[in-house]
Amino acid sequence: MSTPLIELHQVTRRYDEGPPALNDVSLSVEPGEALAILGPSGSGKSTMLNLIAGLDRPSTGTVTVDGVRVDELGEAASARYRRARIGLVFQFFNLLDDLTVADNVMLPAQLAGMGRSTAERRATELLGRLGVDRHATAYPGRLSGGERQRVAVARALMNRPALLLADEPTGALDTASGEDVMRLLSELHADGQTVVLVTHDLVLAERCATRTVHLLDGQVASDSAMELLR
Amino acid sequence: MSALTRVVRAGVGRKRVQTIVIGLVVAIAVTSAVLGGSLMVASQGPFDRAFGQQRGAHLTAQFDVGKVTEAQLAASASAAGVAAAAGPFLTAQVGLTDPAGHPLPPLNVAGRADAGNEVDRVDLVEGRWATAPGEIVLATGGHLRLPPKVAGEQWTISGKPVTVVGVARSASRSADAWTTPAQLAAWAEGPRSYQMLYRFTEAGTTEQVQAGKNAVQAALPAGAMTGALSWLDIRLEAINDTLLLVPFLIAFGLLGVVMAVLIIGNVIAGAVSTSTRRIGILKALGFTPSQVVRAYVGQALIPASVGAMIGAVAGNLLTIPILAQTNELYGTSDSGVAFWVDAVVIGGALVVVAVTALAAAARAGRLRSVDALAVGRTPRPGRGRWATRLTSRLPIPRPVTLGLAHPFARPVRAVSIIAAIAFGAAAVTFAVGLGTSLNRVQEVEDIADVQVGAPHRMEPGGPRPGPREPEAFPDPAAIEKVIAAQPGTAGYMGVARGEITAAGIVGELDAVAVTGPDSARYYRMVSGDWLTGPGQIIVSTPFLTAAGKQVGDSIVLTHEGAQVPVTIVGEVFNTDSDGMQVVTELATLGSVKPSTYYVSVLSGTDASAYTQALTKALDPVGAMADRLDHSPDEMVVVVNILTGLLSLMLTVVAGLGVMNTVVLETRERVHDLGVHKALGMTPRQTTAMVIASVVVTGVIGGAAGTAIGVLLQRTVITEMASSVGFRLPASVVDVYGSYELVVFGLAGLVIAVVGALLPAGWAARTRVAVALRTE
């Protein structure tokens, strides 16, 4: 058995008083897996995603991604970890309105110190691969929801991350655009990309994931491999 | 608690940075305005106020002790036109030696039992009045230049110890020192005289003072009065001393007040206008435009009121030592900030806050709720994208290029930052320029290291009040030979004084005839050339104006009955004698001889040793040398303190203005910050981005402020000089070198960067998960 890409060991995350958002969760994800984290609101899905992305730190327990102890990283190291290993896709795209599509996509690479011309070549390639290259010089506000999410995925893939994290990637899209994004994620996974999705959407999970984890009240209620529907 | 009160309380409590910034800005602005206002008040007719405060003597008269009795003098208080009188006081010249062993020129000492009551009520600025034998009170503001804290020192008179128990200031300049009548009688080895101080019912003109003097003389034995000094002569001298300082200090005062108003207006307008979205929410909840306006005026007034109170206290504390300095300069006795200055400044500051908040909130209050909610959320689409495209191509790190483009997305806010920085940079440039100009004016005072004059001795015929006319040397050539031969001599200027008349000008004028290699260094030329031979004069602007002449014209002078045709070869900046003094070469006035030489020593020469050696060498030719005091002039000290204080305060306030705007900007961009950080922007890169966002505004504000400051300095200083009838030399007007201008310009950038540091740190520390949730 290969080394897990993600390993959460007895992770608990508490916010102030009240019950923990995650409670003693342990989880492993192998390279090349497509994991969907499911659960109702408040079950701890986004908390788990934030912990894997290094956006937050566990109260107790350890988070290891691609051999990196994410729970021990400081702010600067955590930022470097994200741009080297993680691609993030958000529900509301989080594209920067004052940058062109190409500039949005290039940004993670430029933050990592890549030169503009190299970043431009990579961005053009990604935008072409995701079918939005004709919008390269446009601003995100002029794009449809599906197109914006494709641009967001392109941005997430810019630094060739080991792990693509997607938080409700179809949550803000109409049905057609949602289908479009689902297809895209499936294709990426088929190409070997490890993907972790957080979603309410069972259809998305069924279409894109090889494994689902159900969270309930901050604990893993079920963990099952499923056949990927295509 | 009403909904309105809740909104105001929440606004003040939740927006802590903004509340603190408003409070601090108002506090510093009020401090600056209290200081500025007090300076303006202190500079209003300082001599007349000091003279009034002390009930100064309109006539200070000396009497021969052999020709009049004390009883006769006391009775002269009822002469016609005399409103009040003090005396008779015994006076004599006394030779004092300071604790370092340096003998002073003879001082006019008066024997007075107290500091005065009806006339010449002198101010004790240090210590107490002399009440016992061996005690003396020295006069400040006259001939003596005293170091601070003299009271308590042991000096000597003819080898006997004397304790300086106090330092006092007399606007009438009635004596150089005071002691008890009995002590003076014991000290006075030489001739003595009586002094009487008179106040007249009418003393506004020379004729009125002369009439009073005549009435006093008529009431006393003929020939009893040996000398008298009119208060109008002292007034003229005092006004000459502070001719330029008064408009300078008024300009500084105005700077403090005007900058306070501008900065408060800028910060309040910025603070309220960035609350537009909150105003939209309040309106959506049912607040009327008038309630919104009231809420925001209240929200601004609460911290502003606290700040104004703190600023008033700080302003009072800061003003007291400054007033001590201006008292020293003006001879006034201002003890603290006038109550009405505090009241006007506090009231004025709060009115500015209320009016600015009212205008900004009224504008926001008039917006439709939906528009108000949209405003301030994100920049209007399309704004500043050209800048983003442009900067993205710069070969510098991406976080920096992202920051550089920020100001173009919100041009109005960028203008507010530029204004804050420009105010600060302009104020600093202006204040430093003004201070440098005044320093340049004073610089010529420090050229000479040593003064050569007649030996100190007790004059037969009794002491005379007022300035003593120096005696001319009988053989100046011998003295010049000794000075030139003395090792360490760098140069010298001999000065002779005379009185002349000039065709077309009413009344007598002072003439200064100079000789020696250093002469040209002591005068700053406005136009034309320095003297190259006899028959030439240089004069100041008031002379040219009064005579209707210009450089190159000829004019006829009359000196001791002889007509002397001369050519005006140059216009000089010289405030002596109200700018009516004529400067020429010694040979022009024929018979006059120098009475004083000013000597400069070579660099590295020990001036004290040089002075002692020169005195020894001069002894055979009947002259002696005194080392000149080069301790900083009070006027320069005051101006430098003010320059430093105002620059510091206005820079801090400008930095706070920047901080306020960048805090608001950063908070509004917090979601974008979260995105950047989620994509891998490190805290250092975040800090760089925020700092870079103020670089463009800092550079523009600094450059604009410096240009405005230079323009202001040139305009104000030229107008100030013009208001008292002078034109200034280029060296006094053009005080900025290219290096200084670059430093002032970069100061804007420094203000911007320092102001942005706090919000940049906050942005760097913001947690991504929290920022991304922020909507």
Image: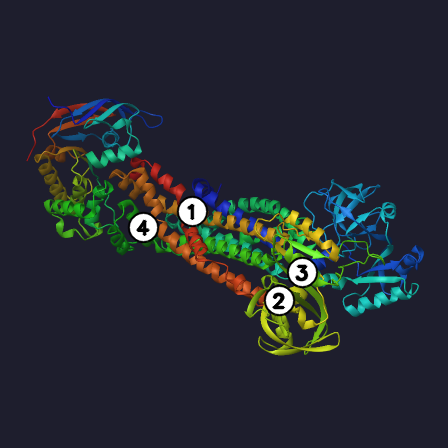
Q: Residue at x 20, y 35 (%)?
A: A84
Q: Nearer the viewer, residue A211 or B604?
A: B604
Whether labels 1 and 2 belong to a single chain: the reply is: yes
Q: Is residue B122 above or below residue B708?
A: above
Instruction: Give whichever of discs 1 and 4 has the lower sequence position.
Output: 4
Mark 4 lies on residue: B404
Q: CA distance from mark 1 to mark 2?
A: 43 Å
Q: Nearer the viewer, residue B252 or B522?
A: B522
Q: CA distance from mark 3 to mark 2?
A: 37 Å
Mark 2 lies on residue: B724
Q: Which labelled disc corresponds to residue B85?
A: none
Q: Is disc 2 placed on a helix, strand or loop?
A: loop
Q: Is residue A152 visible?
A: yes
Whether labels 1 and 3 belong to a single chain: the reply is: yes
Kindly report which numbered mark, 1 or 2, lies closer to the viewer in this rendering.
2
Residue A208: which quarter of the image?
top left
Q: In the rendered view of the protein, which quadrant contains the C terminus of chain B?
A: top left
* Mark 3 vs 2: CB contact within 8 A: no
Q: Residue at x 86, y 62 (%)?
A: B226
Kindly report which numbered mark, 1 or 3, lies closer to the viewer in this rendering.
3
Residue A91 coordinates in the image, percent (x, y): 21, 40
Residue B210 coordinates in the image, percent (x, y): 82, 68
Which residue type does callout 1 highlight?
A: Asn
Instruction: Give whichever of discs 3 and 2 has the lower sequence position.
Output: 3
Mark 1 lies on residue: B660
Q: Looking at this rendering, what residue extends furthest in the left direction?
A: A230
Q: What is the chain identity of the residue bearing mark 3?
A: B
Which residue type does callout 4 highlight?
A: Leu
Q: CA distance from mark 4 to mark 2?
A: 48 Å
